[in-house]
Image: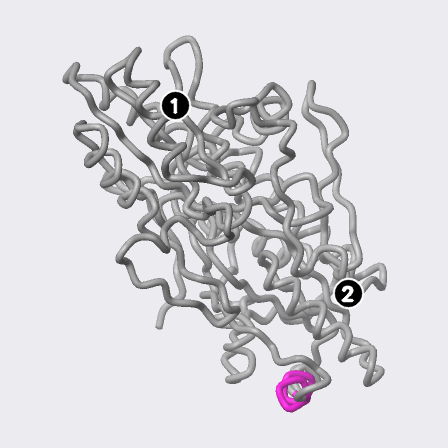
Amino acid sequence: MNVIVGQSGGPTSVINASLAGVYQAALKAGAKIVYGMKNGIKGLLEGRLISLNGILDSDLKIELLKRTPSSFLGSCRYKLKEIENDTEEYEKIFTLLKQYDIGCFFYIGGNDSMDTIGKLSAYGKKIGSSVRFVGVPKTIDNDLMVTDHTPGYGSAAKFVATVMKEIICDATVYGTNYVTIVEVMGRNAGWLTAASALAKGEDCVGVDMICLPEIPFTVEGFIEKVANIQKRKKSVVIAVSEGVKLPDGRYVCELSDTVQDVDSFGHKKLTGTAQFLANECAKKLKTKTRAIELSTLQRCCGHLTSRTDITEAYQVGGAAVLAAMEGKSGVAITLVRISDKPYQYTTGTVEIEKIANLEKKIPVAWINDTHTDMLAPFFDYARPLIQAELTPFYVDGLPYHISLKE
């Protein structure tokens, strides 16, 4: 039969490696046509499908796909209705799956994407459908439960740590009082912000403070810590998660004048944390400040991809196909760590309800007593994930990417 694959949620620099893994494994397993959903489940509902067979028709194109950041098929943030409330969408989806003779459905994404897999699998069971639904993990936030880590995190962590080293070099050149606050992605889990700690080494003093969503945050306490650090060194560099929260549960960015919109899943769009805190430091400490928001650079930095990350992303795509061929449905692929030194892992599967709509946070035991730095267990966990590089193909001095033609 045929298979279908889509990408959803925020892109990563290795999400297309998972797409390549699904595509090649499906063909090897005997699939006639591998269809791609343009813009995820939303595109499927609109009937916007393409055959990947005629597009990814050479080894060179597959290699280009692996080394191209962002979502080749396009993405979406679309929440399916609850089955008990409305089945119209589900009926339309399953009619399309039957029309295109689909036997397996693969969705590459994070928490919300696993929710989609869970709902489709549940409806499929309800109506007796034979289509198998498998989730392929992806997110730079690294907040999926059960899996040791998620493809996309290693490369984003490598980017964050690298940029922090470079910012620290820049921040110290003038020898004057300066506070640099760098805002890193992470709504409720601080895995990516914690990666800032990896910048520290024999050639770099590292960041002076790390602020994570796992630890309740007060502006007064933050200002006091900055003031104490500046008593012993003039230049202070801080990594702060966009999702740091006040004790009452509000995000710190809600204290700013920035309008906080929400997406289709009801998540507040977070921005402005670093700028707000920089302004507070400037007012209360009489120091120059700078706010830097890494924003989408964290997830689209294809020229600084971790080879470990891209290899694992490709393999979870293949593992998803294998799971479907074994008759599994309503599951997600996991990465299972066997050892840290040497770093070894394998893939596994988990029932989708154990991963969808749940969040894995950094263990508080991995954070130091002053809540400003990470401890040894985090370094043992994260360092293997950022190792080695897979450089893009360069043409005229710039990375060369593959994309769908409109």
The residue at which mark 1 appears reads as 207
Residue type at mark 2 is: Gly
Where's the C terminus, which quadrant? bottom left
Closer to us: 249 or 125? 249
Residues in magenta, as a range: 87-95
Q: Quadrant of residue 109?
A: bottom right
Task: Residue 367 in the image: state x and y as whole percent.
Answer: 57, 27
Residue placed under numbered mark 2 in the picture: 330
The residue lying toward the viewer, choosing from 28 and 124, is: 124
**Which quarter of the figure has residue 238?**
top left
Q: Is residue 398 magenta?
A: no
Image: 144 above or below 326 = above
- Secondary structure category for the residue under label 2: loop
Q: Residues within 10 Å of mark 1 (few under 14, many from 20)?
A: many
Image location of residue 385, percent across then percent down: 57, 31
Answer above or below: position of 17 versus 212.
below
The one nearer the camera, 120 or 236, is 236
**Which SS class for mark 1?**
loop
- Residue 250's place in the image compared with 119, above or below, is above
Number of callouts: 2
Residue 214 drawn at (x, y percent): 56, 40
Direction from residue 168 to residue 352 in the image, left or right: right
Q: What distance separates the C-alpha of mark 2 from that of mark 1?
A: 42 Å
Which quadrant of the structure image shows residue 338?
top right
**Amino acid type, label 1:** Val
Circles 2, 1 touching at the beta carbon (< 8 Å): no
Q: Residues within 10 Å of mark 2 (few under 14, many from 20)?
A: many
Which quadrant is the N terminus positioned in?
A: bottom right
Residue 339 image offset from top left, x and y in percent: 74, 25
